Image (cartoon, grey):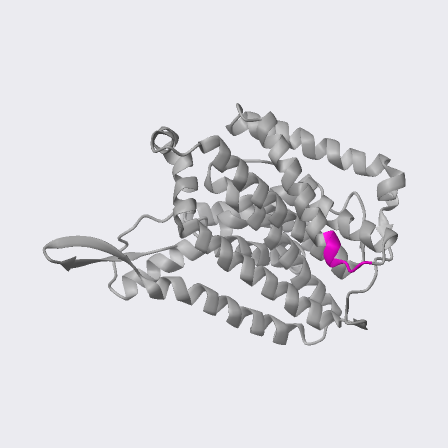
Amino acid sequence: MSTATTSTAGGRTGWRPNRAADIWPPLVGAAVIVALMVWTGGSSYRQDLIQLACTYALIALGMYVPILAGSLSMAYSAFAAIGGFAVALVSRHTGIGLWLGWIAGAAISAVIAVILALATRRLSGFFLAAVTLLFGTAFEYWLGVAEPITGGAMGIGGIRELTAFGTPVPRSVQLLLAMIFVWALTVLIDRLRRSSWGVAVRAIDHQPLSVEASGVRTADLTTVALAFGAAVSSFGGALFASFVRGITPETFTLHVVFLALFMPLLGGRGTAWGAVLGALLVVEITVNFDAIKASGSLLLALAVLVVMLVAPSGILGWLNGLRLRLTGGRKEAPDE
C-alpha cells in the first residue's frame, strides 16, 4: 500500500510520496516481533508456531515477487525443499557452518528457476501453472526415491545445532533472528516493489506491450523475478530445517504452495507485508485453532472468501482505506 499527495509549485502539480505510509509498516512489524517474543513466553509449542509462520512467510514472499509480474509458478514447494535439504546435506557431509546450506540452497533454487523460466518462456497463465505444478510433483517424487542423497522417505535428521563462535544458539534467539530476517526481507521486497524496477515488473502484468515499447525486455525481467522469488522461498526451507533439525520429502508438498497462494490474498497484495500477515493468519487458523483444528483448511478457505468479498484488497488494504477515511486523506495513487 502506498499513497501520494499532490503539491503545487510554480503552477505545476506533481506527485510526492507519503513518507508516513512508508515508515509505519516496518515500525509496526518491529512492534509485532516484540509482542510475539513476549507471547511465546519460553513455550516450545508457541516457538514452533512462530517458526512455522516465518517459514510460510518466506515461501509466500518468494511467490509474491513473480506474482507482481503476473507469473504464477507452482514450483515453490520444490525451492523450499531445496533450501531445507541443502542445509541437511551440509550438516551431514561437511563440518562447515549451516549458513553454507542457506547460500547453496538459494543459489541452486535461483538457477533452477531460471532454467524453468527459459523452458516455459512462451507459456503463461494456466499453462505455466500446470507445467510448474508438474515439476513440483516430479521433484517431490524424486526426493522420495533418491535415497543416497535425500535419505529417501525417512529424509535426513540429526542436523547439527546452530552455533555462534562454537556456542549453541538458544531456540529463543534463533526465533528472534528468524523474525528479524523475515522483517528485513519484507522491507527489502516492499522497497523493491516501489522502486523503478518494481514499477516495471508490476506493469508487465497490466501493460506488457507498453513495457516492451519502452525498451524493457519483459521476459528477462520476469526471469529475474522468478529467480529472486525462488531464492527467498529456499530460505524458508533452510529456516525450517535449521530450527527443527530435520527434513523429509513430505515436509514441503504442493499443499504448502496452495496455502502460500492464500496468504497475500488474506493480508493484501498491495504490499509485501500482506504475505507476512497472511502467514500468521494461516498458521493460527490451520494449526493453532484448537476448536476446529480438524477443519482448519475449510475455515481458511471460508476466511479467504469472506475477505475477498468484503475487502478485495486484503486486510491491510482495507485498513489503509479506513485510515484514509478517518484522516480525511484521499488515495491519490493506485494500490496494487
Image quarter of residue 218: top left
Q: Which residue lies furthest to the right in this view?
A: 148
Does any portion of residue 301 appear in the rendered image?
Answer: no
Report the side of 308 relative to 138 (left or right). left
**Residue in front for this viewpoint, 99 or 156:** 99
Q: Quadrant of the N terminus?
A: bottom left
Q: Residue at x 37, y 59 (%)?
A: 320
**Residue in front for this viewpoint, 280 or 131:** 131
Does 98 lie within the magenta span? yes
Report the side of 101 relative to 149 (left or right). left
Does any portion of residue 91 appear in the rendered image?
Answer: yes
The x, y position of residue 310, in whole percent, is 41, 49
The x, y position of residue 295, in whole percent, is 66, 49
Please, is residue 286 above or below residue 47 in the view? above
The x, y position of residue 240, in whole percent, is 72, 56
Range of magenta residues = 96-101
Please, is residue 140 above or below residue 285 in the view? above
Report the side of 38 relative to 67 (left or right). right
Does 151 lie within the magenta span? no
Q: Residue at x 24, y 54 (%)?
A: 15
Report the side of 91 relative to 229 (left or right). right
Q: Which residue lies furthest to the left in this view?
A: 11
